[in-house]
Amino acid sequence: MNDRVTVEIKDGVADVRLVRVEKMNALDDAMFSALIEAGERLKTETGLRAVVLSGEGRAFCAGLDMGSFEAMASGGRAGNRDTSAALLTPKRTQGGANRAQHACMVWREIPVPVIAAVHGVAFGGGFQLMLGADLRFVAPDAKLAVLEIKWGLVPDMAGMVLMRGLVRDDVARELTYTGRIFSGEEAVTMGLATRVCSDPRAEALALAAEIAGRNPHAIRAGKRLLNLMGEADQPAILMAESKEQSALIGSANQVEAVMANLQKRSPQFAD
């Protein structure tokens, strides 16, 4: 995994970096495996409070490796796998994702907030990977695109699930039909990014540290509710709110949050 993705955990914050620098962190078979391995590891990491996902070098992620498109041009299949089998195989996650989709969706499944720090480019699969995070901090001059139409394809790494609720229907259609490149600033305006930052990774790490100082059980409960919000009906969401709150009220960490505020000191939470 380490030649594609590295993970460093300090004070409850996982600093996850795509490190295929010479290829602008493009997605090949090994990168898909590394993203899934890193995400699955973090789903069960003890003491984890927040995650920052970023890319080393000139870009966050340039999308699918050019070698895959060259294979398609010669009548072959993408990478070292049969594309049709990979897309249609019944071997899917509990949430319904195939392998490529899982590389993006796994970040939503991690029980703590994930912040993507995006610079350079996030094209195609790289753009969909960015969408898998809870929050997306982008450089003002970052270049983003739903680029699949350039290659005669459609977004297939959970892009349709992840764009849903972020942008208007017509905006998603325009980006999908044209593949046009847009800036980090426009991404914020459209709702596809959270904020523009001169140094996205530094600001993402700072926010992750702030989140790490909150009641970890409340943060995890909040993510469960927010994930549910986009797919459940009103009665289910209202009941989930009540259940999560009932579990939190009077718990050790919730009491500690109250006492720390009253005593004007930093809280000391237990995992």
Image (tube, rainbow, N blue to C red):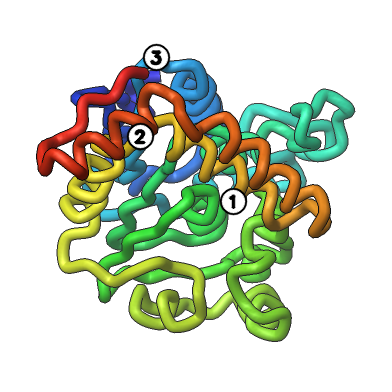
The three-letter amino acid code for the residue at tag 1 is Leu
Left or right, 201 with reference to 65: left
Q: Which mark is residue 215?
A: 2
Q: Residue at the location (22% across, 67% down)?
A: 197
The mark that comes first in sequence, 2 or 3, is: 3
Q: What is the secondary structure assignment of the residue under circle 3? A: loop
Pointer 2 local density, CA inside 10 Å: few below 14, some 14–19, many at least 20:
many
Left or right, 185 with reference to 139: right
Q: Quadrant of residue 33?
A: top right
Q: Which mark is residue 46?
A: 3
Pointer 1 local density, CA inside 10 Å: few below 14, some 14–19, many at least 20:
few
Left or right, 186 with reference to 150: left
C-alpha separation, residue under disc 1 versus residue under disc 2: 17 Å
Q: Looking at the picture, how far across and down is residue 120, in whole percent?
A: 29, 62
Q: Residue at the location (46% across, 29% down)?
A: 250
Q: Report the number of discs.
A: 3
Pointer 3 local density, CA inside 10 Å: few below 14, some 14–19, many at least 20:
few
Q: Residue at the location (65% across, 46% down)?
A: 241
Name the residue that disc number 1 marks.
226
The mark that comes first in sequence, 1 or 3, is: 3
